[in-house]
Image (spheres, rainbow, N blue to C red):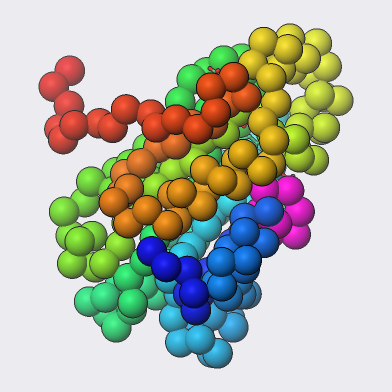
């Protein structure tokens, strides 16, 4: 996808990964806008990034609301706006999950892990919907391991020993590496259903795709 003139909306873009994603999109010529402006000034949306998230095991209702319900709500709103069959231009929806959405290694954070598993399952499920081709939509999910942003500081403060132990094992991603992976997901029109995993040890990788209806 060429990004020149495309309209993007990134949730939670004030800092951290959301800010870095927005800056990378702007550099490639996209317009990164507030939701109201997207409709009133640009008449549509091409790229939706559900990025906002928190880590707070003590307030699980809030965390589920932001990390999972927020992604579902943002996705639903974007589908309505982008659906070619309803006058939209089509486009891509990228949901930001985590490696915690694939493996439960952060044992001290079961609710965070649950919300991120939800994001991965929700995004994968949409990507397998046979009607999205007509709607002009594709879906992708980004799963970074620990990355150098503010959310990490609060985790280390809340769970110093547990977090440090895992971080020492797996390392910390640079924001730039995660942003590079994010841009691949946005620009590669072939990557519907991609679940991209990014770790400090192995860099950018694709998690294996599910194949149709599972035979368990
Ligand atoms: N930094 C890390 O180690 C990793 C982060 N992630 C995910 O990446 C996403 C971005 O996190 P970071 O940039 O790392 O953290 P961050 O704490 O720097 O940024 C989070 C952003 O979300 C926004 N936000 C929080 N609640 C919101 C709400 N109710 N409505 C709108 N915006 C809200 C904040 O204002 C902030 O801009 C999150 O979904 C997080 O779970 C995933 C894997 C690793
Ligand atoms: C992880 C619980 C607290 C969440 C808030 C802080 C930062 C967010 C980090 C993540 O989302 C990444 C979460 C867990 C990573 C744990 C292990 C990574 C394993 C990667 C690997 O297998 O190499």
Q: Is residue 115 magenta?
A: no
User: Percent from the top left, x then y, of residue 191?
Assistant: 32, 48
User: Percent from the top left, x then y, of residue 75?
Assistant: 43, 59
Image point 38% across, 29% down: which residue? 207
Look at the image and tell me in which quarter the C terminus lies. top left
Q: Image quadrant of residue 19? A: bottom right
111 left or right of 102 in image: right
Point out the residue furthest to the bottom here: 41
Q: Which residues are magenta?
A: 12-19
Image point 25% across, 31% down: which residue? 210
Pick the front one: 69 or 3: 3
Please indicate, yes or no, whether residue 192 appears anywhere in the rendered image: yes
User: Percent from the top left, x then y, of residue 63?
Assistant: 64, 41
177 left or right of 84 in image: right
Number of disc labels: 0
106 left or right of 167 in image: left
User: Percent from the top left, x then y, of residue 215?
Assistant: 13, 22
- Residue 73 vs 9, above or below: the answer is above
Q: Image quadrant of residue 172? A: top right
Please indicate, yes or no, whether residue 108 appears anywhere in the rendered image: no
Q: Is residue 16 magenta?
A: yes
- Residue 160 vs 113, above or below: the answer is above
Q: Image quadrant of residue 61? A: top right
Image point 62% across, 24% down: which residue? 200
Look at the image and tell me in which quarter the N terminus lies. bottom left
């Amino acid at each position: 996808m060429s990004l020149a003139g495309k309209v993007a909306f990134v949730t939670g873009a004030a800092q951290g990964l959301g800010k870095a994603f927005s800056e990378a999109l702007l550099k490639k010529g996209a317009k990164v806008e507030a939701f109201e402006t997207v409709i009133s000034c640009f008449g549509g949306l091409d790229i939706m990034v559900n990025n906002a998230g928190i880590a707070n095991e003590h307030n699980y209702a809030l965390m589920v609301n932001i990390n999972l319900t927020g992604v579902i709500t943002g996705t639903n709103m974007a589908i309505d706006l982008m659906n070619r069959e309803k006058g939209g231009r089509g486009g891509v929806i990228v949901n930001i999950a985590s490696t915690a959405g694939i493996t439960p290694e952060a044992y001290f954070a079961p609710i965070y892990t649950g919300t991120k598993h939800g994001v991965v399952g929700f995004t994968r499920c949409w990507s397998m919907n046979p009607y999205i081709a007509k709607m002009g939509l594709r879906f992708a999910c980004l799963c970074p391991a620990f990355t150098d942003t503010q959310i990490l500081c609060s985790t280390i403060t809340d769970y110093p020993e547990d977090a440090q132990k895992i971080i020492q094992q797996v390392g910390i991603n640079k924001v730039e590496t995660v942003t590079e992976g994010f841009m691949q997901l946005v620009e590669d029109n072939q990557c519907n259903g991609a679940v991209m995993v990014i770790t400090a040890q192995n860099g950018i990788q694709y998690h294996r795709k599910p194949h149709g209806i599972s035979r368990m």
